[in-house]
Structure formats: structure tokens, C-alpha cells
Image (spheres, rainbow, N blue to C red):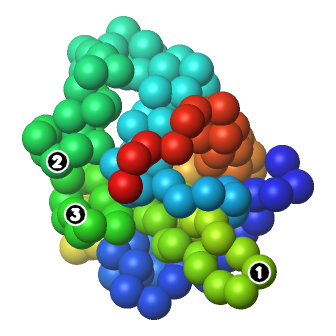
Amino acid sequence: MPSIHRSELPPGALLGKYQHGKAYADCYVTQIARHVSHAEFVQAFYTTPLFKLERRLLAWLVSKPSTDAQAGQLASGILDAFAAWSVEERREDQLLMCDFQGRTRSWLMVIPMEGENSRGTRLYFGSAVVPARAARAAARTPDLGLTFRLLLGFHKLYSRALLCSAKSRLMRQRPAQR
């Protein structure tokens, strides 16, 4: 996944509110050499084979099933909930989702790149993990938990793999009509 790398959040990123303080936030970016709408990116991301595996696990473990059709409806703004997440905030170029327990956030953003020598799109994926409310209230420096610390390496690799999988799907698709 050499074309996927960790990045600072771009200005105006909805995930920015979780970047400082006691939460963990990350951001990964890649580029694709064509225009990709935000809706295309969201749908591609949530319908990759890798993410479908996560969706199956969520359906089985926490009774939060989802379909590719629902991913398309989320992408187009028809739905505000998908699998284990609900929309926390949405803009034309980005989507911030919150899990049903309120502990994690997932964020997708596109930025068009147009210049003399390039035409394409930057694709961003990031996530945040926030401390449990009880921990925030009871401690001066709340901890994100042992499970989070143990899974952080996997999370970073998985985040890159998800973005790579979405990019691969978009590269195989025909560009949408603008």
C-alpha cells in the first residue's frame, strides 16, 4: 500500500474536532487520477470486499446488518444510518459517522486536484476513538482502554487497507458523468 500514507487533516475537516484533547484521531490519504465525487467514494468504500467482511461481522456480532443498496443511499444522502454508524455531520465533500456506542468516528473526504499537470482527486479516510463518558467524568486524563492500545497497530494497517481497497474499486469503475 505504498500509495496510501498518513497525513495531517486538511483544513475544514469534520474530523478535526477530535484531533486534539483526549481522543485519538488519524488520517490517511491517497490520490486517484480522475474526478471522483464524494458519493462515489462513500459507496465504493462501504461496498469493497474488505468492508463487506466487516459488515458481516457487525450483522452477526451486534445485529447491525447492512446492504450495498443502503451504502448507496448513505452515499447519496438518502440514509443517515448505515450498519453500526449514524451520520454525525455531512458536507458536500465529506461525511463524519459515529458508531452506535458513541466511541468511534469514521470520516471520508474528497478534494479535487486540478492544475497544469494533474487532474484527479485526493481521497481521505480517518477515524477517531474517544474516551468513554464515565472515564472522562471520573479521571483527569481518561484512558482509551487496553483494547484500543492492543489493537492500534492492527487499526492503522486496516485503515490503510480499507482506503487502498476503495481506491482499487474506483480505479476499476467507469467515471460517473458530471
User: Could you say which disc has been placed on residue 77 in the image?
Assistant: 2
Using the image as rendered, state which of residue 33 and residue 143 is in the foreground: 33
Does residue 89 appear left or right of residue 45 in this picture? Answer: left
Using the image as rendered, state which of residue 139 and residue 71 is in the foreground: 71
Q: Position of residue 75 (x, y in %)?
A: 28, 43
**Amino acid tagged 1:** Asn
Mark 1 vs mark 3: give the one in front: 1
Above or below, 53 against 119 in this view is above
Residue located 72% across and 75% down the image: 118
Where is residue 58, by image quadrant?
top left
On the image, numbered disc 1 is attached to which residue?
117
Alpha-carbon span between mark 2 and mark 1: 33 Å
Residue located 11% across and 41% down the image: 78
Where is residue 164, by image quadrant?
top right
Above or below, 87 against 15 in this view is above
Which quadrant: the C terminus?
Answer: bottom left
Residue farthest top in this picture: 60
Sequence-first disc among 1 and 3: 3
Mark 3 vs mark 2: give the one in front: 2
Does residue 163 appear left or right of residue 73 in this picture? Answer: right
Q: Position of residue 168 (x, y in %)?
A: 69, 37
Sequence-first disc among 2 and 1: 2
On the image, numbered disc 3 is attached to which residue?
90
**Amino acid tagged 3:** Arg
Find out whether the residues at labels 3 and 2 contact each other: C-beta distance under 8 Å.
yes
Find out whether the residues at labels 2 and 1 contact each other: C-beta distance under 8 Å.
no
Where is residue 4, by image quadrant?
bottom right
Sequence-first disc among 3 and 2: 2
Q: Is residue 126 visible?
A: no
Local secondary structure at mark 3: strand
Q: Position of residue 136 (x, y in %)?
A: 29, 72
